[in-house]
Amino acid sequence: MNKVTEFFAEGGALSQQIKGFHPRAEQLEMAQAIEKVISEKSVLVVEAGTGTGKTFAYLAPVLLSGKKTIISTGSKNLQDQLFNRDLPAIKKALSYTGKTALLKGRSNYLCLERLERLIAQGVLGDKSVLKDLVKVRQWSISSKTGDLTECTDLAEDSPILPQLTSTAENCLGSDCPNYADCYVALARKKALNADIVVVNHHLFFADMAVKESGFGELIPQAENIIFDEAHQLPDIASQYFGQSVSSRQFFDLCKDINIVYHTELKDLKQLSSAADTLQKMVQDFRLLLGEGNLRGNWREILRQSAVEKSFKILIEKLDFLSEVIKLALGCSQTLDNIFERVENLKGYLQRLLETERVGYCYWYETFARQFALHITPLTVADKFGEQLKTKQATWIFTSATLEVDGKFDHFYHRLGIENARQLILQSPFNYTEQALLCVPRYLPNTNRTNTQTELGKMLLPVIEANQGRCFVLCTSYEMMRNLAEYFRSNSQLSVLLQGEMPKTTLLAQFTVSKNTILVATSSFWEGIDVRGNALSLVIIDKLPFMSPDEPLLKARIEDCRLQGGNPFNDIQIPEAVITLKQGVGRLIRDVTDRGVVIICDNRLVMRSYAETFLKSLPNLSRTRDLNKVIQFLQNK
């Protein structure tokens, strides 16, 4: 019996370490497959159904291999869970003595230089922000990592956070007076010296993108690279292989210029005036892009004469600021760094005028008073596929949702994966006994003014019979808000709504409260783990097809059509299937869980592609009768 098999066996090291651990055939099969590809330095793609125990299945062979490994997760929450809970358990069971490190993006670490500046300014106005500053200051005295998530008194959406962290642009690097104590530099140094490094996908691709210009240090050292929640990779990778510019970059720039003017260069009044003019121009430009949260085609909106004129004035004001800064170059190290940022921004804006380039989607998004402009490649298959070929390492991709209709073709195509070993492991849960899938009869017609009310009326008796304990997962913010409003007006149940408080607070409240409905959208479809009686009903309003007007998807559809493909079959169905699998996966999280998924979409019964969706879901018992749903829920 080899070490991996021994580790997972009945009475082995893992069962001695973890109370109630029982061997699972699927978990062992995955661990053995990973052990094999590590010895071969090849590529493995694994879909591991919920409950497989995939985290332990990859951690054990990786630690036993003794090789430098990067593990990349889908979110910072999963990263913390992996590093603080799962990794210590496996290390203890294996008596592992190698070094481990957690590395996040710089926006997660307190910048000591920025903290000092904020304290020195002392003109924060808002009392609640001042309160938060005091909390951070007290916490920072004893913090060893500077990771702001460890400052538990601070809300995760505190308005002070962006002011306390640095960006790659405004960081002073080794010229910073606090460089010796810099938390970002310390975390990176620790990661470079560690045997196991836990990162997230955003940071991995940021490092890969930097490596392309010769600065990335982390990836070249790794012998094993593992992606958990790998279904998120194609979309995240495309952000980093493209270019983006945001209003926040301009506002930070203007703010930093004014700080330099007030502290170091008080005689250069023109510097402050030029920064204020630029800031006003950015605000004016934001107004031209429309109200609220929007996503649109940059190529199209730039054809509007007012937008084009305003954008060109923005470039002129940035040029003028650059000329003013040239007058004082060499007088201040901070200003010299700012000059570099201005020149980079000029390059980005110039690139945004070159909209005739093909192979990219040019798009913009707006939120509240901010905006961002993006140039995103339509595929990352070339660049990422090249990394797979040239980097001599073991690559492992795993998630509960990668295959569509029993195949990985869609995932392979988007990332340029060739010649990979593959494995599909079914969940060890007994879905036919534990869960029921219902597509109700007599669903209201969609796109009518009263659709949401009719849907609420149909669903509420089922939710009340279950005493809440229900997630309602919506495909749009409008549906989410309207259903929440209907439930609040027509029921005594407590209704929690995404956006009204931080995600972690919502989840904590949902888990401990009785008679509660949580109504949410995109960010609650995945990465949420509520076990036991707290959640026994998941309702999905319709199949999660992305809007074909979404700029990036629209550009990919056009590109697919030009290449002779069928966008609906090649892009829209596979992506909707993967999202639906994620949503359905919220229900059964443990062997003792029991519950119902209701999907309010007749297309799952009427359309020819329904079978593709149903085949990709776990093998749940099915009904169309809501009375049977109530019976199932009440028959404990």
Image (cartoon, rainbow, N blue to C red):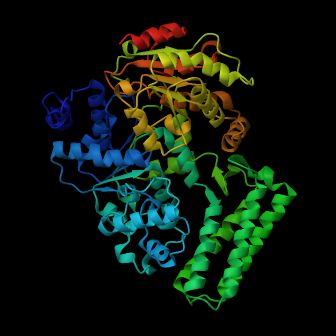
The residue shown at (68%, 76%) is: 275
Q: How many labels does the image show?
A: 0
Please state if 521 lies on the left or on the right of 271 as rendered: left
Q: As drawn, which residue projects farthest toward the right? A: 305
Q: In this view, does 206 lie above or below 20?
A: below
Where residue 480 appears, as percent x and y from the top left, is 60, 33
The residue shown at (53%, 19%) is: 598
Instruction: Say which quarter of the image contains residue 22.
Output: top left
The residue shown at (47%, 72%) is: 114
Q: In this view, does 245 lie above or below 77?
A: below
Please state if 85 lies on the left or on the right of 136 as rendered: left
Q: Nearer the viewer, residue 464 or 377?
A: 464
Where residue 568 appears, as percent x and y from the top left, is 67, 29
Report if residue 212 is visible in the image. Answer: no
Where residue 228 appears, as percent x and y from the top left, is 40, 41
**Quarter of the image where the C terminus is located:** top left
**Quarter of the image where the N terminus is located:** top left
Where residue 47 appears, as percent x and y from the top left, is 41, 31
Q: Nearer the viewer, residue 513 or 412?
A: 513
Please state if 185 lies on the left or on the right of 484 as rendered: left
Q: Which of 240 and 119 is in front in this view?
A: 119
Instruction: Say which quarter of the image contains residue 36.
Output: top left
Q: In this view, does 162 lie above or below 72?
A: below
The residue shown at (70%, 65%) is: 349
Report if residue 467 is visible in the image. Answer: yes
